[in-house]
Amino acid sequence: MDYTKRTKQVLKEFGLSDNEATVYQAAISLGETSPFALAKATGIARTTVYAVLTDLALKGLIEMESATGLMKQQTKVRAKNPSVLRDILWGKRASLTEQEVDVVEILPFLKKDFLKNETNADFQFFPGMEGANHVMFDYDGVDQDTYVFDYLIPMDATGSREMNTGVDKGIQLWSKGKCIERNLVPLTPWSKHVLTYQVERNPHYRDRVEHRFLPFELTGLSVMARIKGDRTWIISVKGDEVWGLKIRSQNLADSLVGIHQALWKLATPITDEMITSWGPNDFLAAELKKK
């Protein structure tokens, strides 16, 4: 490593100009010296060296014993021990910490004026089965990765025709994009029933969807939650709680996606071969027979 070059880079990050870093390194190397010797060693004009030395002295990095008149070029220059660099940083750190305490004190008052008791989040609640269906099948068509917690809502909540129409609408929209829906589901007799039914009914059901199951059950999962971008859709149709909720909140979306991604790493992929191994879907066969 070229330590001369690296030292200059760090000194500039510390807050020195290019000329200041060059003159400071030369002053350390030469020991007690003069502006004339520094100008000669660095190739920087002597008038510029005088100005640079003044700035370095103000920053506490060198000491100068001034001469005047015709003897100005004999001014003595001594670089301080380079450890002063760290001393200066520690001084700044203490000062910044005290300043941070003051800033934290006034931030609530500034933010109150900035936010004006408003929020850039939005919550829309849709009660009843109609509201739940509205949220469940609200596919916006935006091509973004989607993260889903899904206990696989039963068709009796919506009716088979409505459910399949909504599912096919989603498949059609996904086919036009490139992003993926990552769907965490429990592995139960019910989820096996739903997956075999939908895969047999529409072979494109999993074209842009990945399913995984966890080595433990999400026993309390009683809603479906779908997260995309800064939006979250939540659907509840279990028991007497029937509603849909659409939320636009980046903080909520980021939090739920973080949980989803952590669980996704622990989860096992559900493959097409696995679904096939569960056998044909009796319900679909009976449904087709009735048609």
Image (spheres, rainbow, N blue to C red):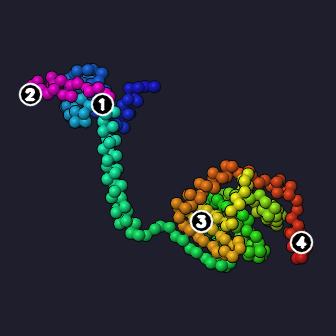
Q: Is mark 2 on a helix, strand or loop?
A: helix
Q: Can residue 38 be seen in this view?
A: yes
Viewer-closest of 179 and 277:
277
Q: Name the residue under label 2.
A: 69
Going by the numbered disc 1, the residue's amino acid type is Val
Q: What element carries label 3?
A: strand
Viewer-closest of 219 and 60:
219
Q: Which mark sits nearer the N-terminus, 3 or 1?
A: 1
Q: Residue at x 41, y 26 (%)?
A: 3
Q: Residue at x 63, y 73 (%)?
A: 244
Going by the numbered disc 3, the residue's amino acid type is Thr
- Discs 1/4, front: 1
Horizontal side of 184 relative to 276 (left or right) equals: left
In the figure, residue 83 lies in which quadrant?
top left
C-alpha gap between disc 4 and disc 3:
36 Å
The 10 Å Cα crowd at callout 2, few under 14, some 14 to 19, many 20 or more, is few
Q: Is mark 1 on a helix, strand or loop?
A: helix
Assess whether residue 81 is covered by the magenta stretch. yes
Q: Which mark sits nearer the N-terminus, 2 or 3?
A: 2
Position of the N terminus by quadrant: top left
What numbered label is drawn on residue 232?
Answer: 3
Label count reads: 4
Q: Which mark sits nearer the N-terminus, 2 or 1?
A: 2
- Position of residue 94 relative to residue 271, above or below, is above
Q: Mark 4 points at which residue?
A: 286
The 10 Å Cα crowd at callout 1, few under 14, some 14 to 19, many 20 or more, is few
Q: Mark 1 points at which residue?
A: 84
Q: What stretch is highlighted in magenta?
A: 63-84
Q: Residue at x 54, y 67 (%)?
A: 248
Q: Is residue 49 visible?
A: no
